[in-house]
Image (cartoon, rainbow, N blue to C red):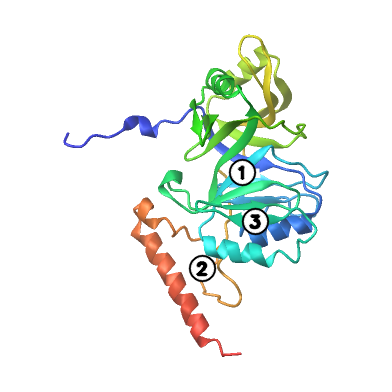
Amino acid sequence: MDRQYDRGAEDLGNIVALEHVNLQIEDQGLATLFYMSGLGLTRDPYMMTSIDNMWVNVGRSQFHLPTGKAQRLRGRVGLVVPDREALLRRLDKLRPALEGTRFDFVEHADRVEATCPWGNRFLCHDPAPAFGRITLGMPYVEFDVPVGAAEGIAYFYRDVFGAAARVDMVGDVWAARVGAGIGQELVFRETEVKLAPYDGHHIQVYVANFSGPHRRLLERGLVTEESNQHQYRFDTIAEAGNGRPLVQIEHEVRSMRHPLYARPLVNRNAQQTNRNYAPGYDAWIPGAAAEEMDDPRIAMRQRRFEGATRQVAARRPAR
């Protein structure tokens, strides 16, 4: 063999997907403005279609947004959004409609940080090799945790879940990094700032070995809900040995036999509008990272869409 491969780079731990983040919100209309009109995401057209909940698709992941007292993630959600300039334009247009809420956004060199009307923070990144093949998606959720907790959290995920987990420096602080699927991770970042009381928001993950983590959670008295054949919940990450709570965040744990596992999600092309409409390009086009994906067909499709929108603009009469 004249070529060497890094076989270890293909390994996954037992957590195979980070599927959704669940946050209660107080107003479905304001949520529609922020998540769809601002971030450019897509409301699930098939599920939760009433006015008391919505599921919002972001690549292969989702936000679940039931109506209730607003919840705030003690941390940040990382997103990959394909077009920064379009994102900034969409967010800027929201300022009048969301005046009086906690909505805001600021552009940094490596991201756009957007804050929803209830104070949740979203770090929106351009597609990049650091995120693998994700050009629209949820590569990480980052949680704030007390100083000294990172090592115990990493051990908990390795010991209880069989997950790939390590501790390293993120910026100038220690953080536990837990593999949560292809190109996805949970990041537990230490902070000296006192954490707000936990308010019940949750994340949902899929695991390959479903019974093993369940058994070890039961042994520690940590299972909080036996949901059904395919799902259980727990909400405390505890230190090995003494069981001391390290941080609280509810996990909805599902097996890969769950009926919703790998359900195809609809994602729209947020650049498509009635003003620049190009037939055949309504769906999301993952073209921004075509070079990383080694698929010239994707780049060609993106170029065709851009060419079609230019033709539409050229035919539009001057006003």
Residue 153 vs 123, above or below: the answer is above
Using a 10 Å C-alpha cutoff, classify the residue at mark 1 as few (fewer than 14 neighbours), some (14 to 19) or many (20 or more): many
Confirm or deny contact between disc 1 and disc 3 (CB under 8 A): no
Whole-angstrom CA distance, mark 1 to mark 3, is: 14 Å
Residue 268 location, quadrant: bottom right
Q: Nearer the viewer, mark 1 or mark 3?
A: 3
Q: Position of residue 181 (x, y in %)?
A: 50, 36
- Circle on res. 77: 1
Q: Nearer the viewer, mark 2 or mark 1?
A: 1
Q: Position of residue 127 (x, y in %)?
A: 47, 52
- Circle on res. 281: 2
Name the residue rendered at 51%, 81% in the picture: 312
Of the image marks 1 and 3, the number of the one nearer the N terminus: 1
Using a 10 Å C-alpha cutoff, classify the residue at mark 3 as few (fewer than 14 neighbours), some (14 to 19) or many (20 or more): some
Query: In the image shown, does 83 or 308 lie closer to the viewer?
Result: 83
The amino acid type of the residue labelled 3 equals Phe
**SS at circle 1:** strand
Which residue lies most toward the bottom here? 318
Query: In the image shown, does 225 or 121 lie closer to the viewer?
Result: 121
Whole-angstrom CA distance, mark 3 to mark 2, is: 28 Å
Judging by the rendered image, the residue that carries numbered circle 3 is 105
Of the image marks 2 and 1, the number of the one nearer the N terminus: 1
Q: Nearer the viewer, mark 3 or mark 2?
A: 3
Does residue 295 appear to the left or right of 110 in the view shown?
A: left
